[in-house]
Image (spheres, rainbow, N blue to C red):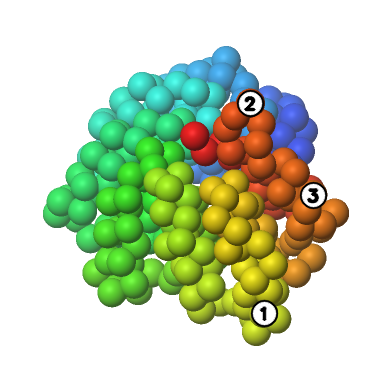
């Protein structure tokens, strides 16, 4: 029941049931409880759970340490998450991904890249997957650092094993190139996405012919954003703008190029390019 509550996004009920639990929990139960705590962003309860885990002999379990790392990271306590990571004798892929993703989401580019290289140099059998590489690309994108293109190219060549390139990886590269001012490269990458439907490709190319050749940087950036909307969400994705002109109208704000990107249906994120 505790696991069911946690998976159903009812963390308060999961924690309440755990507190009322008359028997000793196992590893699966504790992972669910820590996950519920993470969903609430309840640092105090998370610290209490860590004390319980350590005092009841669960502290060595990789899955629990990874769950605690995730909890601390999402509560903004990266030093505590790193301490747990450094104290692990054995690290799973989830352990590496948790900390690498945490650094990336907090904008700590140098730590993200450093830990990724540490992972590659590690003698264990753990290799990066799509989650790892998305976090690394995100870090490079935050920095507007075109060296991230090397990582993407290595993914395409299979250097990291059989890692499936997803729309998120492509979207991250488009963001990276856009921040670096390489708008033509970014637009071409959208056009060349192998996962686009023929209809999406037609719409993107049509958008390019409508206002992609006007020369103004703002126009090119809007073309990039609206095209990425189509690529990620299909033709209906441009529904976040009533029209292409509406998209162009949000470009200039306080003398900066500013656009709104929908990162999920109904969820929008502002991107500002100097």
Task: Return the mark for residue 254.
Answer: 2
Task: Return the mark for residue 246.
Answer: 3
Q: Nearer the viewer, residue 255 or 125?
A: 255
Would residue 151 be seen by someone viewing this image from the given angle?
Answer: yes
* CA distance separating discs 2 and 1: 34 Å
Pointer 1: what residue?
Answer: 202
Residue sitting at 34 percent across and 36 percent down?
109
Name above or below for residue 8 compared with residue 42. below
Closer to the eye: label 2 or 1 = 2
User: Residue 178 appears at what percent x and percent y?
Assistant: 47, 50
Q: Is mark 1 on a helix, strand or loop?
A: helix
Q: Report which quarter residue 115 is drawn in.
A: top left
Q: How crowded is mark 3: few (under 14 residues within 10 Å), some or many (20 or more)?
A: few
Residue sitting at 27 percent across and 46 percent down?
116
Q: What element carries label 2?
A: loop
Q: What element carries label 3?
A: helix
User: Residue 106 appears at what percent x and percent y?
Assistant: 46, 31
Residue sitting at 32 percent across and 58 percent down?
149
């Amino acid at each position: 029941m505790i696991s069911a509550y946690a998976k159903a996004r009812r963390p308060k009920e999961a924690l309440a049931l755990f507190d009322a639990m008359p028997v000793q929990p196992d590893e699966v139960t504790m992972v669910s409880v820590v996950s519920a705590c993470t969903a609430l962003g309840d640092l105090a309860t998370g610290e209490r759970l860590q004390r319980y885990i350590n005092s009841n002999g669960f502290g060595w379990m990789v899955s629990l340490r990874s769950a605690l790392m995730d909890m601390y990271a999402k509560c903004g306590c990266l030093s505590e998450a790193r301490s747990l990571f450094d104290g692990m004798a054995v690290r799973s892929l989830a352990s590496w991904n948790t900390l690498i993703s945490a650094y990336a989401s907090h904008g700590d580019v140098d730590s993200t890249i450093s830990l990724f290289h540490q992972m590659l140099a590690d003698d264990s059998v753990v290799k990066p997957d799509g989650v790892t590489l998305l976090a690394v690309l995100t870090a490079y994108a935050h920095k507007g650092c075109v060296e991230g293109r090397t990582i993407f190219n290595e993914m395409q060549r299979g250097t990291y094993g059989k890692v499936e390139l997803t729309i998120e990886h492509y979207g991250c590269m488009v963001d990276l190139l856009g921040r670096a001012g390489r708008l033509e490269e970014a637009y071409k990458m959208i056009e060349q996405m192998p996962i686009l439907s023929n209809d999406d490709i037609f719409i993107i190319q049509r958008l390019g012919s409508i206002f992609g050749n006007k020369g103004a940087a703002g126009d090119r950036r809007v073309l990039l954003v609206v095209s990425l909307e189509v690529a990620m969400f299909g033709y209906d994705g441009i529904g976040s703008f009533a029209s292409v002109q509406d998209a162009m109208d949000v470009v200039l704000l306080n003398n900066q190029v500013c656009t709104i990107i929908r990162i999920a249906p109904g969820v929008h994120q502002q991107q500002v390019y100097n």
